[in-house]
Image (tube, rainbow, N blue to C red):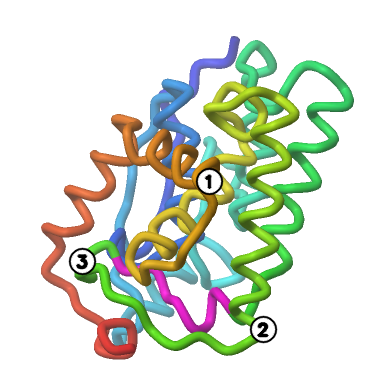
Amino acid sequence: MKDLSVLTLVIGNKRYSTWSLRPWILLKEFGVPFEEIVIPLYREDSKSALLTHSPAGKVPILHDGEASVWDSLAIIEYVADLYPDLVIWPRKRETRAHARALACEMHSGFAALRSECSMNFGRAPRPISLTETARADAARIDAAWRDALARYGGPFLSGQFSAADAMFAPVVQRFDAYMIPVSEESQRYMDAIKSLASWKEWSLSAKSEKWRLPQYERD
């Protein structure tokens, strides 16, 4: 197994950065050693700081020696390749395909929900009025979770924690913070995610951050 002591994950504000949370929680849950660099977003110097790490100028970015990988899902795939002994994706082909389909749907979809319900770990839970499109996004996620939990028995989407759960972790916070109603099965799933030590560590760190972005602090 490759020694990953040189891995560095560059992330944005933990309070708000959904894409940063995804590979971070995956690395933590699978015990992959890494160092983190936090770059506060949307400041005058943010873009220039990010460009020193990636030509995309966005978080997250993973450094492994001379290799650099950006985009959450690409980072997850890179780590899965580095650590083939870890069950980052389920071993069974059909289950792995289902997990990948869920992860990709999250990666490319649910734009309305993501736009109307920005992730904010410091937000006191309270409901807001959602558009019909955002409500449809939430209903699809709830249905996808229920289907996966019924297929594989929970408590996570493939039975055991996997990359698919990492991809949906920010949605758990959104559903909580905006008090979006879900099924009992999905609520149990959310409780399982929130019980993870990695989730609690991120949440505590996010709430202790001093940086605030006004556009994410209002409904």
Residue under numbered circle 1: 186
Q: Are marks 2 and 3 in contact (CB under 8 Å)?
A: no
Q: Which of marks 3 and 1 is nearer the N terminus?
A: 3
In the rendered view, does 210 fall on the left or right side of 120? left
Front residue (pair 24, 108): 108
Q: Which residue corresponds to the image point at 38% horizontal and 58% vertical from the top-left?
A: 173
What label sits on residue 91 in the rendered view? none
What is the distance, in whole Å, between disc 3 and disc 1 at their CAs? Answer: 22 Å
- Give above or below for 57 relative to 6: below
Q: What element carries label 3?
A: loop
Amino acid on which the number 2 mark rests in the picture: Thr
Q: Which residue corresponds to the image point at 46% horizontal and 34% vertical from the top-left?
A: 7
Q: Which residue corresponds to the image point at 64% horizontal and 58% vertical from the top-left?
A: 141
- Give above or below for 113 relative to 209: below
Quadrant of the image occupied by residue 109: bottom right
Q: Give the range drawn in magenta.
A: 113-120
Residue under numbered circle 3: 122
Q: Is mark 1 on a helix, strand or loop?
A: helix
Q: Is mark 2 on a helix, strand or loop?
A: helix
Can you say which quadrant of the picture contains the N terminus? top right
Give percent across and percent down for residue 95.
Answer: 80, 27
Give percent across and percent down for residue 178.
Answer: 37, 71
Mark 3 or 1, which is nearer the eye? 1
Mark 2 or 3, which is nearer the eye? 2
Q: Which of marks 2 and 1 is nearer the N terminus?
A: 2
Give percent across and percent down for residue 216.
Answer: 32, 82
